[in-house]
Amino acid sequence: SSELTQDPAVSVALGQTVRITCQGDSLRSYYASWYQQKPGQAPVVVIFGQNNRPSGIPDRFSGSRSGNTASLTITGAQAEDEADYYCNSRDSIGDVVFGGGTKLTVL
Amino acid sequence: EVQLVETGGGLIQPGGSLRLSCAASGLSVSSNYMSWVRQAPGKGLEWVSVIYSGGNTYYADSVKGRFTISRDNSKNTLHLQMNSLRVEDTAVYFCARDRFNLAAAPYHYYMDVWGKGTTVTVSS
């Protein structure tokens, strides 16, 4: 199945902007969805589709896509945004794929 | 309130079997695509299996032939029967509802409701 590649770790200063990326061939056909996971908790979807936020997700979270790369941007990162972030889509045969995850540290 | 609650995890020896359940409220298991996703200790998310509303089932290569996804419509519950368990199946197992739009590319696919997970430990 297709793979989705993410940087293992990213850091951002409090209040600054950070971009987390996800690369994979499947992203030429699919928008990526993005999940936030805090320790000991289930994942929570923060972005899906072109740039959709579920109810309750702050508008500092946004998504974009170019070619085979999807990006999650957090504009004005807050301490509570420190978490693991995963991208997700389906591959060419319909299997679900997740990226390896990015650990975001807010300094 | 839409909710998924997983049960059935535990400690099991290699080669053993376990059946996980995911009780749904506020949504219909039979009307949705439902997935199992697992997370090994300290590792990332791994999709395990999906059952479509029409009944078709699909599996990750790592569990194909050993795991079976099913649902009990009368109890609005999703199941995962896990046989021939291996040490590497040790993980927290989450159930989730799949949402998607395949009308035109680029398509979108995501999981919008997740349970809190149940822990499976395969060890001798």
Image (cartoon, helix red, strand yellow):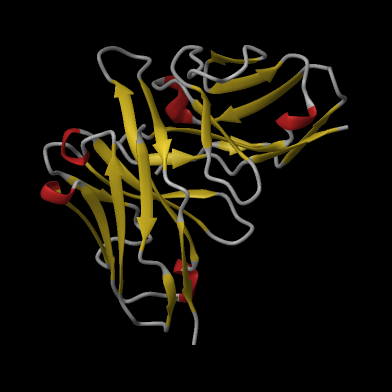
On screen, residue A1 above or below A70: below
On screen, residue A23 above or below B93: above
Instruction: Judge whether residue A2 can be spotted in this image.
Output: no
Q: Whole-percent x and y of residue B122?
A: 46, 76
- Name the residue located 37 percent from the left edge and 35 percent from the top edge: A91
- Name the residue located 28 percent from the left edge and 12 percent from the top edge: B104
- Name the residue located 28 percent from the left edge and 60 percent from the top edge: B64
Instruction: Judge whether residue A63 can be spotted in this image.
Output: yes
Q: Quadrant of residue B25?
A: top left
Residue B115 left/right relative to B71: right
Q: Whole-percent x and y of residue B45?
A: 51, 48
On screen, residue A36 above or below B116: above
Q: Quadrant of the N terminus of chain A?
A: top left
Q: Whole-percent x and y of residue A28?
A: 44, 20
Foreground residue among A32 and B8: B8
Q: Quadrant of the C terminus of chain A?
A: top right
Residue reaching furthest to the front? B1
Foreground residue among A106 and B103: A106
Residue B91 left/right relative to A72: left
Foreground residue among B10 and B34: B10
Foreground residue among B56 and B29: B29
Q: Please count the marks in the image.
A: 0
Q: Whole-percent x and y of residue A41?
A: 57, 46
Residue B43 left/right relative to B120: right
- Name the residue located 42 percent from the left edge and 84 percent from the top edge: B13
